Image (cartoon, rainbow, N blue to C red):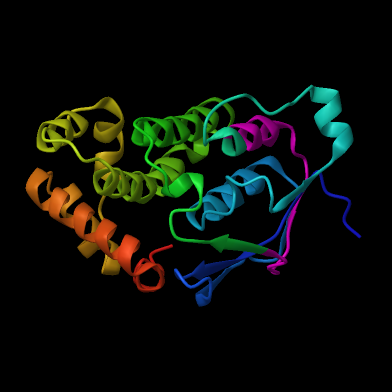
Amino acid sequence: QYQPDLLIYGLKEEYYNANRKVEYEKVIEPRSVLNKDKKSIYTHVLELESKTLFGYAWNKCYRTELLKEKGIRFKKVKMIEDVQFNLEVLPYVKSMKTLEIDPYSYAIRPNASLTHQHLADYFELHTTRIQLFIEEYEHNMPELLEACKQTMAPIYCRYLLSAIARYDQPNLKHWLLQIFDSPLFQMLYPYMRFTGKKKWIYGPIRSKNAVLCIVAGKSAGFVKEKLPSLFAKAKQTR
């Protein structure tokens, strides 16, 4: 009906327990919208990313002619290849259709996916992801750069707490103090003014309290590992 350059739909997250049974399901869907101008596309992309719907490749259909014409291919990078690909496609998208449906089932099993494995550069990979977003908006949609930073701030905080949960090192406090002084943290810090549940979850990061950040991150990591379905329900901040 619409013949868009990019089609995006939702998914259903299925959280399995150790007995291979689904304990909890979460549906994540975009609003059903047809975007046909550059600014509205970039605006909607921020909304999609806040719901974790933009970075994936498997919840999208791409116009083949567009990819061939622009010579866009997946890069050999770890973990963030999908979002890098999508950001490379984005400047050439002239029409984008989102569907309020969830035909894709995403099974989340204990310690079964790459996202649950230990990656020494986990945080660096995800901060690169955020930097790619900021650079894209800075270069191609500067009028939405502030909105981009505002969208990226809670995502950055989520990745930081996840990194704390994953990292098991004696100098974690020192590492956090370095993070607080990093250019990306300083750039996003003014946008870390949260309300509601996000205020309580990301408050230690906003206060730059390394000890409280470690407590929050390790506590979240424990719940995620031992009670994944409970963690999925508790993290409803997107």
Q: Is residue 100 magenta?
A: yes
Say left or right for 24 vs 198.
right
Say left or right for 101 vs 132.
right
* Picture residue at 35% right of the left edge, 68% below the top: 231
Which image quadrant is residue 228 in?
bottom left
Which image quadrant is residue 121 in?
top left
Q: Position of residue 210 (x, y in %)?
A: 11, 43
* Picture residue at 30% right of the left edge, 43% below the top: 163
22 is higher (above) or lower (below) than 207: below
Query: Bounds of the magenta span?
Result: 84-104
209 is higher (above) or lower (below) than 90: below
Quarter of the image where the C terminus is located: bottom left
Q: Position of residue 202 (x, y in %)?
A: 24, 55
Q: Position of residue 102 (x, y in %)?
A: 68, 68
* Picture residue at 35% right of the left edge, 44% below the top: 156
Q: Nearer the viewer, residue 71 or 143?
A: 71
* Picture residue at 49% right of the left edge, 30% below the top: 132
For the question of whether residue 194 can be seen, the reply is: no
Q: Is residue 140 magenta?
A: no
Quarter of the image where the N terminus is located: bottom right
